[in-house]
Image (cartoon, grey):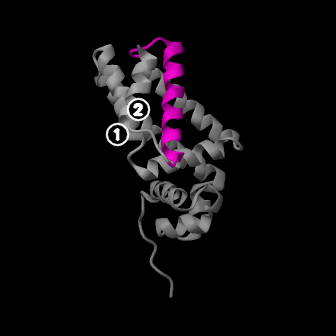
Amino acid sequence: MRRPRRHDPHRRDRIIDAALTVIAQKGVAATTHREIARAADVPLGSLTYHFTGLDEILTEAFTRHAQAIAEIFDARLTAARTRAEAVQAVVDLVTDDLLSPANDLILSTELYVAAARNPALRAVTQAWMQRSRDALEHHFDPTTAREVDALIEGLTLHSALSTAPMTPAQIRHAIERYLK
């Protein structure tokens, strides 16, 4: 007997969210249509109905991830009114926002690695970097914004991957030292 078809207008979004969950748990290399369908609690055919393939799902998922982090950048830097507040916002981005949610950090790292080989994902990282720089340019000139964006990425990756991560005080020192 066939199951009744359920009305599911948010199925596509749920698939994208499930893809992010699978990537965070298993990595891009182990992310498959079946794993995503299982995590989204949808039939496998739903993935091919809503997406042209796994690359499109990954691109949409990582775009969603990058946009969420870019919104945090925007909020922190828009709230800053002075240069000192902007420096504090950068410190808070690294110590509170980028290093704290473990899944976000794993997703960012997975995106960097996957983007090294996939031009569509490289476009996602480029758009993300540009949006971060745009937020930083509220307080810093374009060259400084680009350099600070790279510093943020480096501090985040170094802290995330190190067996002796930098302390928040060390991160603050690095950012303040650069921006003085």
Q: State the residue at coordinates (43%, 16%).
A: 179
Residue 113 against residue 86 in the figure, above or below: below
Distance from label 1 to label 2 (Cα)? 14 Å
43 within the magenta span:
no
Residue 44 picture location, percent across and down: 58, 69
Residue 178 picture location, percent across and down: 46, 18
Contact? badges 1 and 2 (CB < 8 Å) = no
* Tag nearer the camera, 1 or 2: 2
Residue 172 picture location, percent across and down: 38, 28
Q: State the residue at coordinates (32%, 25%).
A: 88
Quarter containing the C terminus: top left
**Residue 133, which numbered label?**
none
Give the labeled residue for mark 2.
Answer: 170
Give the amino acid type for the residue marked by disc 1 in the picture.
Asp
Residue 132 against residue 62 in the figure, above or below: above
Label 2: state its secondary structure: helix
The answer to whether one can see residue 179 in this image is yes
Give the labeled residue for mark 1.
Answer: 96
Q: Which of disc 2 and disc 1 is earlier in sequence?
A: 1
Magenta residues (range): 137-163
Q: Quadrant of residue 166 in the image?
A: top left
Q: State the residue at coordinates (31%, 17%).
A: 84
Give the amino acid type for the residue marked by disc 2 in the picture.
Gln
